[in-house]
Image: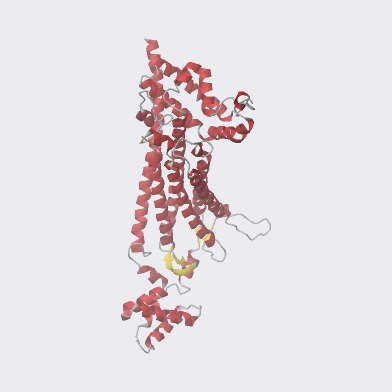
Amino acid sequence: MQNDSANPKSVFPAPIYSDTVLSRIFSDAQRLFLTPLIEIEYAHTLMLAKQGILSRATARECLRALDILSNPLNLEDLRTTRYDGSVEDLFFLIERRLAGICGVDNAGRIHTARSRNDIDMTMYRIVLRQNLLNTLDALLTLRTELLRLASDNRGSLMPAYTHNQPAQPTTLGHYLMAVIEVLERDTERLLAAYTRVNRSPLGACAITTTGFPIDRNYTAQLLGFDGLQTNSYGAIASIDYLTESCSTLAVAMLNIGRFTQDLLLWSTVEFNYLRLSDGYVQISSIMPQKRNPVPLEHVRTLASCALTESQAALGSLHNTPFADMNDSEDSFQPLIALAFDDATRALTLLTGALSEATFNTAHMRKAAQGNFLTVTELADTIVRTTGTSFHHAHTVVSAAVRQLAGNYDAETMAATVRALLANDPEQPLQIDLDTLRQSLDAQHFIDIRTIPGGPALSALNPEIARAFNQLNNDTTALTAHKNALQAAKLLLRTDTDTLLSDNEAAASN
């Protein structure tokens, strides 16, 4: 019997393999990785010339070819070329195009002291860091809008809810500051993830570096990395840069989803706390009266998609070998890009909807005055005034609540509690009726909660000021990262032009 390898049933790539895997990978690479792949070609060529591994004359030929390949028409051609199986992937298509411009020998020399392994890991990190910056940008914009709303509504009374039931009075500013603090922590986590993503694996080669005297720090500088992913084995095999980024994104989207769920509830006719502008509602095809807050539903959906896509990434990588494996590479990378794209869309849409929304603060204030929301302070006032235990005060106030049977009225509540205290056979207590009335006022409830973190203006105002300062600090950090990447692009172009101009200077002499 003949070995199948001697009489193969198909040649590479087998049509099914091409259709189900390679053509998809090729298309994804055209969409996601073309630009970083060409930047890596420039950086590696410059480094080989700097280290004397590649002659400067050869390097100039290769850089000129890269310049030709990078012109808009040729880039568009690379982006739109259909996969035909004549090359395995986009990397080899670029190598073939370069060979057509500067010759097979020159194009082949660019590949000295590198592997597709470290090229892939480098371009994955380049794309991921940009996705992190895009999401951070959208998150900071949302925080800016929420801070405006919190500042404008720092004194706007509303009910606070526990277990979806009205609990105590607070202010809209106090509630929004709670959301802002969560988003500050999300920002902190994403910025921390960025610092670990932005480390260069280039130079790790297949997995053990190379015997050529390459300069990994130089290519890291040219490509905008803050340092190296030093250990070459880990540079290829480690995936925690991905899993950390996905984990922090999932946490952020969970937080956004919970906030959006509140906003959707507040948008109902029954609550009537929040009204979106006409530009952010959709009507019914059959019911003329409907003002559906559909964009908020899209925010919730996009956030949920980003969260589950991030979780899917972690699940896909669970129990994979600690080595170079396709599990975290070609077919996997679009999932990461999709998660960050959905997250950025969710944040941007939520910011837009809130920027034109109005809060029914008069209705919220009225709700804060009802439903027994202030009776915690009523019990506290009894303790402060009479010296009795909170347990006893709580028992008396609970009895009064039961007597009113859900029909709250501040005047009746104060009178009932006063009577229960005075007529207690075991511990009769006297308390002024005006004192009881004051304790049931929602504004009074807010005003005396002055400890750090409370809703009183004396506690809330410093927190709003702190949040503005933190927003400025985080914006500065994001801008610094963006500027560093722009500076690296400029350096890459400058060093390319310098090397190319050397030949022109020599020719003129």
Question: Which residue is rendered at x = 41% and y = 24% of the image?
Answer: 113
Question: Which residue is rendered at x = 41% and y = 58% of the image?
Answer: 178
Q: Position of residue 92 (x, y in %)?
A: 52, 25
Is residue 144 shown left or right of residue 353? left
In the image, is residue 48 above or below residue 328? above
Check the picture and name the quadrant holding the C terminus.
top left
Q: Position of residue 131 (x, y in %)?
A: 47, 41
Check the picture and name the quadrant holding the N terminus.
top right
Outermost residue toward the right? 286
Q: Position of residue 168 (x, y in %)?
A: 43, 69
In the image, is residue 324 above or below residue 140? above
| Front residue of 328 and 31 | 328
| Front residue of 121 and 480 | 121
Is residue 43 shown left or right of residue 269? left
| Front residue of 150 and 69 | 69
Residue 373, image quadrant: bottom left
Q: Position of residue 359 (x, y in %)?
A: 49, 60
